[in-house]
Image (spheres, coloured by chain):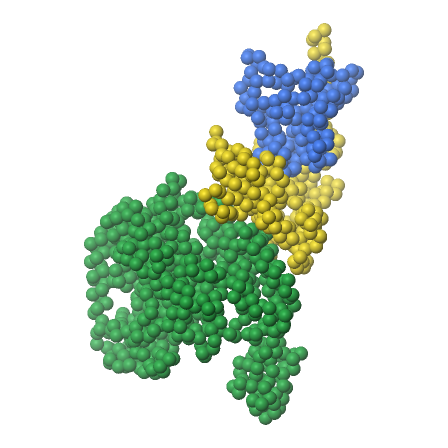
Chain colours: A green, B blue, C yellow
Amino acid sequence: MLVQTPQQLNDLHKQYLADEEKFAKKVLVCCGPGCLASGAAKIVDEFKKLLKKKRIKDFSVEALKETGCHGLCEQGPLVVIEPQGIFYTKVKAKHVEKIIETSIRKDEIVTDLLYTDPKTNQTIERYADISFYSHQHRIALRHLGKISQYDIRDYIAQGGYQALAKALTKMKPDDIIDEVTKSGLRGRGGAGFPAGRKWATCRRAEDQPHYVICNGDEGDPGAFMDRAIMEGNPHSVLEGMIICARAVGSEDGYIYVREEYPLAVQNLQLAIDQATEYGFLGENILGTDLSFDIKVSRGGGAFVCGESSALMKSVAGEVGEPRAKYVRSVLKGLFDKPTVLNNVESFANVPVIINEGGEKFASLGTPKSTGTKAFSLVGKVRNTGLIEVPMGTTLREIIYDIGGGIQNDRPFKAVQTGGPSGGCLPESKLDLPVDFDTLTEAGSMMGSGGMIVVDDRTCVVDLAKYFLGFLVDESCGKCTPCREGLYQLHRLAVKISEGEAAEEDLKKMEKLSEMVIIGSLCGLGKSGPNPFLSTIQYFRDEYLTHIRDKRCPAGVCRALIRYDVIAEKCDGCLACIEACAVHAITGKKGEVHVIDQDKCDKCGACYAVCTRDAIEVT
Amino acid sequence: MNSIFVVIPNLCTGCRTCELACSFAHQVDGKLGHSRIIVLDSGIKDLWIPVTCLQCDDPACVKSCLVDALRLNPETGAVELNQEKCVKCMACMAACPFGCTLLDSQHNMIVKCDLCGGDPVCAHFCPTKALTFKPLAAKQLKVSA
Amino acid sequence: MSKMVHITINGKVVSASEGEMLLAVIRREGIEIPALCHHEAVEPLGACRLCTVEITKEEWDGWSNFVTSCLYPVENDLIVSTHSPKVVQLRRTLVDLQLARCPNSPEIRQLAEEYGITKTSYEEIPDGDNCILCGLCTRICDQMGFAAISTIGRGHGKKVAPPLDEAPPDCVGCLSCALNCPTNVIEFTDAGNIRTIWDKQFELISCAKCGKKTITKEFAKALSESREIPMSYFEICDECHRKELVQTMGRIALWSREVVS
């Protein structure tokens, strides 16, 4: 099925669209990372099984789509009925029969499966009416939740590859670069380098050949935007890469996917095979002289391989260690040749920029940070999930209007952005707009899009300790300041969390942090002290409480907390005694239980099971 | 290269001024270095042999160096050892068929004659002209490999 | 013929060839800065970070950058400070960190003393050896063409080892790794005609004339094969080679006496 001309593509687009409109309704089962983990596969199987047996007018199993991440992961598994946009939450396989009989055969709603707005306590039938969705503007995530992850025809039906046709037949390579430059697209991996400028530099580079690489390493804990795009809409990434190949003059592309994303590898490879079959990859694409092939390159399980020079070494089959050469990889990259390396989300934006023009993209967001950004909003918010908003949206809007505020109405404490390279911002900064520069000025950074919201039960010392420990594990180990400096910073954070530190240790950490930043070879080391520096900036008192009072206000640091039974509330139900793995609690049924502090290992199991509110942490 | 180092043992008196001059010319940390020329007793009466690097046209030492620390200088004709590149593996010492790559055990380095960069001091100071550094006559100039 | 550029080092204007690394120029000016992972035989790595200098340019409006001079190519109008307060503080911190890693290494302790440090201000690493992970041993071994050892692992667990921690099949016992280790961590023994290093044994060549031990048979064989040097060259030691030369030159001298007279 080789598509040789734009006209042919257009015909296919119309045909596939018509094929879909044969069906009165569509059932979209979200198979994004969150819903898959919650059992979406079983729901799909049940639908397939039942739909094969049943006879429904204007409907068949072909109208069932396994889609990418719909967004509201907290409420998953999600099932959507189009075109009405009916939104079913927390679906289980046992609900499938009812959904079919109620919403597909008939036009009714299964009210038990609807989303309930926590503010009004009313159910909402359509996802478009839920504030989580209504505040979003999805460009990079545009087809997620709406098209099949596995079928190129869905992508073409939605207008896919039209941008490629336009770029190849109506534009010259310099025109493409102009459009991307006009759009103001900055690298979505976090560094925010202007994509247009990068592509222009590569295009001009005399050394041949040129390479195009997509960075799908996504190592930040809590981030899954790139995973959702690679799994849910792989063709958007391919299309962006092929357009880039035309712009910079490349014949070979790689998508570097972290080892821990086998589904992304699978879906990308499937998409590559289909795109090749249709002639969007391979020789003489769309009848032009562009030949381009993409290979999927798997990582080995190293966060440091998200760093561009380490990534390129890994693709070349060498050990993924960053190099310290002061020559940019756009000139000497993969195999020492000019290489464009861009993030998954950056490439996913490119087809839209080509189709609608760079100026339109630049009209969204802020002048210096144009367009939109995808975030994985996780942590203690009510609506955890995958979102996309125009740049410049404030943290408050994201966390409260979209995120629905803090779970259980607990007080907001901080929002951690930018992964291990980023930092924490407190409530006083909630009105800051999220973009490449503002958060950095405030001592954090936007990063690749991970956004972790924490409440008063999270200890910032513990948080800093976690990220430092992560970086110590992931450091490549080549340079002294990162390997030894972050190690010592982590050891000092452990000391603080155990109540063994003195105030001079804080000063020592601050000085060491500065040296690690100026001395480190690569970004991992240079930004490594950030989790500590941003928390000490805004939460110094919490550190001092750990040091001076040997107390953890959030009730997290094990060495500094104790669990006690509140005698007045305890009715001797034995629940905590059964839950305690180290047998630290004694007491008979009906009598007040007592926790032996010497045996207690602060695991918190008793606190978790007590339904009488009779356990306190201090 | 248009000069050549000439050794005439019959003129050598065994005074070893050349060794002293060489040590002075190759000081290490302000102290006398290891001489790269050695005057040895031939065992025959009144015959001493100054032994130093023959600056081969096809040097075995250069071939043996796996880190390219040795090279034949086309201007001076000397085979030079770059001390900073040397990894002290002693391959050159083992390979030289004339034993002219020497171990300076005091300074833990390998040394050899480098013709002092084109003006060898030993020839300069040799009182009997047993050692000279002569320009080659046109017909004596060889094309080096 | 490379272009000349002019840079300022500690206030003094010097010239350099375009593309030269800063460290070479700095050293040429007689300025001493430590560079533990540097060796001219191998490509610079930028791992120890001790050779870091502070650089700026007039058009940078007061902003400066910290770069490792071993890897930074000179550019025209670069302004370099090799001992600015932050650079010295960085070197001090790096040495302090290395001392935490290798508290018992005489070489590191000596280096630390130069910075006024007698005991590390950080936590000493338990059960550490004195390896500072400069990588010189592995890089030189690679450059020699043997690639018998390499660094394995990542981060703090990184170490230098032969494949699978067993006797390395490609090692020829040349000792280049051990002889260039800044902290003398790599152990080897020469006992009789057996050399042991990396748990592997090698036979040392005994001079056919005097019996003095030279290099290992394996090393000689590798050199002979890869560089086409007759194996016979390696069978005689340097002293005996000189004696042979003396014999030859003596014969020529005697003969020329007769010819002249």
The residue closer to the viewer here, A493 or A152, is A493
| Residue B23 visible in the picture | yes
The residue closer to the viewer here, C230 or A555, is A555
Q: Quadrant of residue B79?
A: top right
Residue A121 appears left or right of B22: left
Q: Could you tell me residue A170's position as x and y percent?
A: 23, 49
Q: Is residue A4 above or below residue A606?
A: above
**Identity of the residue furthest to the top in this view:** C261
Report the quarter where the C terminus of chain B lies: top right
Q: Residue at x 58, y 38 (%)?
A: C26
Q: Residue at x 55, y 81 (%)?
A: A607
Q: Residue at x 47, y 73 (%)?
A: A412
Q: Is residue C261 above or below residue A220?
A: above
Residue B126 appears left or right of A388: right
| Residue C48 visible in the picture | no
Q: Could you tell me residue C223's position as x and y percent?
A: 60, 35
Q: Quadrant of residue A32?
A: bottom left
The residue closer to the viewer here, A54 or C71, is C71
**Identity of the residue furthest to the bottom in this view:** A590
| Numbered disc total | 0
Residue A350 appears left or right of A341: left
Q: Could you tell me residue A391's position as x and y percent?
A: 36, 62
Q: Could you tell me residue B46's position as x and y percent?
A: 78, 15
Q: Is residue A42 above or below residue C188?
A: below
Report the quarter where the N terminus of chain B lies: top right
Q: Residue at x 49, y 38 (%)?
A: C77
